[in-house]
Image (spheres, grey):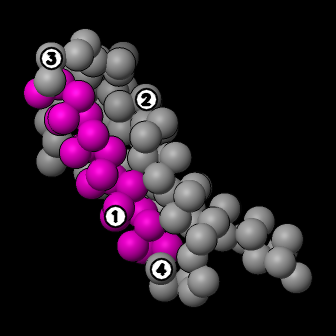
Amino acid sequence: MMTLSDTWLDLFGLAGVLNPLSLLIGVVLGWKADQPAKLAIAAFAGAVLSLFIEAGWRTIGLPELIPHDAGALAMIPFRFLGAGVIASVAYMIARKRAA
């Protein structure tokens, strides 16, 4: 029987795809986007800024909100994916509300 390691579970869970910080940044930037091309920027910003915020949080000595064993380079694509999907959803909702 094959099972996923803890690292993969972190990447597909709250530390990666479903990270609340990256999703929040993706929603805000997706909502404010005025062109579909800006959704890639929203996804990238969600991935990178969430990592910066987490690093700053740890640097000042506060406990980790979501403990994980995956490295930052491993988390970027997964957070990019999560932030991109939620930014697209927010963009579509904002466009329908504006119409």
Badge 1 amino acid: Phe
Of labels 1 and 4, earlier in sequence is 4
Q: Amino acid at mark 2?
A: Leu
The answer, for residue 37, to whether it is visible in the render is yes
Sequence-wise first label, 2 or 4: 2
Question: Label 1 to label 3, Cα distance in Å?
Answer: 26 Å
Of circles 1 and 3, which is in front? 3
Q: Earlier in the sequence, mark 2 or mark 3?
A: 2
Majority secondary structure of the magenta segment? helix
Which dot marks residue 71? none
The dot on residue 38 is: 4
Residue farthest along the top direction in this orientation: 63
Q: Which residue is mark 2?
A: 14
What residue lies at 59% left-to-right and 71% top-to-bottom? 32
Residue at disc 4, secondary structure: helix
Above or below for 5 versus 80:
above
Which image quadrant: the N terminus? top left
Highlighted range, magenta: 39-59
- Across and down, in percent, residue 76 comes to 26, 51
Quadrant for the C terminus in the image: bottom right
Residue receiving disc 3 = 61
